[in-house]
Structure formats: C-alpha cells, structure tokens
Image (cartoon, rainbow, N blue to C red):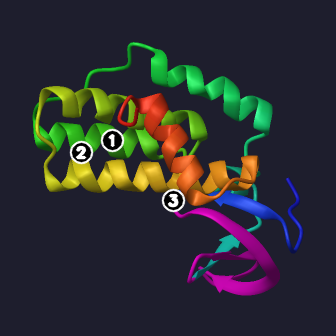
C-alpha cells in the first residue's frame, strides 16, 4: 500500500501517527525509502518495502470498528496464571497491532482482573492496549478522550 504525506496511520507498536514526509535512509548498507511517521512526541522511520503492511495500517473504518465491539461480549481466551507465560501470551497477541487483537487483549485482561490481582506488567499491558484503542477510537468517531474512555468502560463493564 502506498501512503502519502498527511495520512493518519496506525503503527503496529506505537499506535496512531501521521506520515510527515518520505526520506531515504541507509539500512544494512542499502538506500531505502522510508515513511517518516510522527507518533505523539516520537518520530519513527518505517521502510516503504514489502513488509510495510505488517508495520503500518490505515485506521479501522467506523463500521468495522463497531463490529469489533462484539469481542468485548464474547467469552474470551483464558490467560495463564503464571506471570511469565501470561507476559509471553500478551506480547504474542499484540504483535500484529490489529484492532481485533487489542480488543481481545483488553477483554481477556479485564476478565483476568476479576479473578486475580494485576501485577505491574499486566497493568502496563492493559494501559498500553487501552491507549492504543482509545487513540484510534477518538480519530475514527471524532470524539473527545473522556467520551471514548467512558464508552470503552461501558463495553468492558468497568463503568456504569
């Protein structure tokens, strides 16, 4: 996919950003065209090669976004009680950066938190997934932060 300067994109690790320019970088001794993406106060260079689609995607459409809300009402996938195994599960599930994966992680961590106490890593991963989802939610639905947080809380059953 070809992206253009000014496009809003979702980076698989860093979340919502904007392409601010194209640049040439030397990577492993080869000149490579890169998208320069501004994510909050971070600037990243993403090679515009065949694997760009695994790193960048366009924001989810409003209709598709709403379909994903059903994930929060599904039974979910159990997380390991072993903290290191759970950490590996969460890393693996979030690797692709898709909104579906993010919603699934939030659902499963919310269910886990009802049974067990979060450790620091669980809390960190919950906050990261929530932030990634909220950022995209605000863009897609054009709503303020508080509104998106309140609606997500309702979906997760953490806000009445």
* Mark 2–mark 3 distance (CA, rounded to whole Å): 16 Å
- Seen at 67% across and 86% down, the residue is 26
Of the image marks 2 and 3, the number of the one nearer the N terminus = 3
* Mark 1–mark 2 distance (CA, rounded to whole Å): 5 Å
Local crowd size for mark 2, using a 10 Å CA cut-off: few (<14), some (14–19), many (≥20): some
Please state which of residues 131 and 26 is positioned toward the viewer in this rendering: 131
Local crowd size for mark 3, using a 10 Å CA cut-off: few (<14), some (14–19), many (≥20): some
Q: Label 1, on which residue?
A: 90
Read off the magenta span: 13-41
Of the image marks 3 and 1, the number of the one nearer the N terminus = 3
- Where's residue 31, x and y in %? 75, 83
Q: Are marks 1 and 2 in contact (CB under 8 Å)?
A: yes
Q: Is residue 15 above or below residue 39?
A: above
Q: Is residue 75 above or below residue 22?
A: above
Q: Which mark is residue 13?
A: 3
28 is within the stretch colored magenta: yes
Dot 2 falls on a residue whose secondary structure is helix
In the image, taking residue 91 as reference, residue 118 lies left or right, namely: left
């Amino acid at each position: 996919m070809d992206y253009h300067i000014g496009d809003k994109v979702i980076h698989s690790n860093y979340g919502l950003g904007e392409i601010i320019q194209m640049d040439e970088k030397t990577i492993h001794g080869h000149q490579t065209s890169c998208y320069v993406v501004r994510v909050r106060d971070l600037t990243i260079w993403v090679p515009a090669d065949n694997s760009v689609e695994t790193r960048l995607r366009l924001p989810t459409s409003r209709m598709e976004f709403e379909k994903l809300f059903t994930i929060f009402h599904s039974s979910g996938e159990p997380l390991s009680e072993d903290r290191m195994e759970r950490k590996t599960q969460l890393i693996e599930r979030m690797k692709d950066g898709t909104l579906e994966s993010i919603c699934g992680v939030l659902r499963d961590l919310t269910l886990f938190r009802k049974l067990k106490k979060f450790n620091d890593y669980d809390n960190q991963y919950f906050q990261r997934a929530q932030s990634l989802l909220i950022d995209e939610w605000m863009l897609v639905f054009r709503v303020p932060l508080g509104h998106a947080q309140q609606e997500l809380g309702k979906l997760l059953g953490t806000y009445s």
